[in-house]
Amino acid sequence: MRVRADLVDWTAINSASFGRDPGTIDVDAELAACTAPDRRVHRFLVRDADGRAVAAGAQRLPGPVVRLPLGRRHPARRPRPPAYTALLAVRIAAARALGLRRVGLYARTDTSWPIVARQGFVRAGPMAYWTRGG
């Protein structure tokens, strides 16, 4: 099934980007969540001209504003045109198709911020990282 293969590729890209073991993810459970009629998370995969998966992202629909988490390009692949830009554009188009007028995302100042700024996003505030104390 192509959908399952796409999800395996999606998982591999995110695992490589975050330094995680892709074998720790239950692909069948993720597939069930992604294909449920009332799903709130949508996943996107960008392939290059040779069919290799080069970028992966998601969007969450908690309410009137869509969140775009997990926009990642495979760290070992630099496709042209830039896959992250294509991934961002397709997620914005999908949000518009659902009737949503606003999207929000987290962008690291040293990586994705210049890309999202060129597409018209404005900084709304900092993000705090929390860790569990011991």
Image (cartoon, helix red, strand yellow):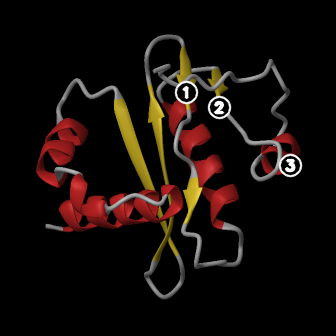
User: What kind of residue is marked 1?
Assistant: Arg
User: What kind of residue is marked 3?
Assistant: Pro
- Which of these two is toward me, 15 or 112? 15
What separation in Å lies between label 1 and label 3 (alpha carbons)?
A: 18 Å
Q: Which percent across, then down, holds residue 1?
A: 13, 67
The circle on residue 67 is 1
47 lies left or right of 128: left
User: What kind of residue is marked 2?
Assistant: Leu
117 lies left or right of 19: right
Q: Which residue is mark 2?
A: 105
Q: Which percent across, then down, holds residue 105?
A: 65, 31
- Which of these two is toward me, 23 or 51? 23
Question: What is the secondary structure assignment of the residue under circle 3?
Answer: helix
Q: Examine the rendered structure and indicate whether residue 48 appears above or below residue 105.
A: below
Question: What is the secondary structure assignment of the residue under circle 2?
Answer: loop
Q: Which residue is mark 3?
A: 114
Outermost residue toward the front? 134
**Are circles 1 and 3 on residues that touch, CB within 8 Å?**
no
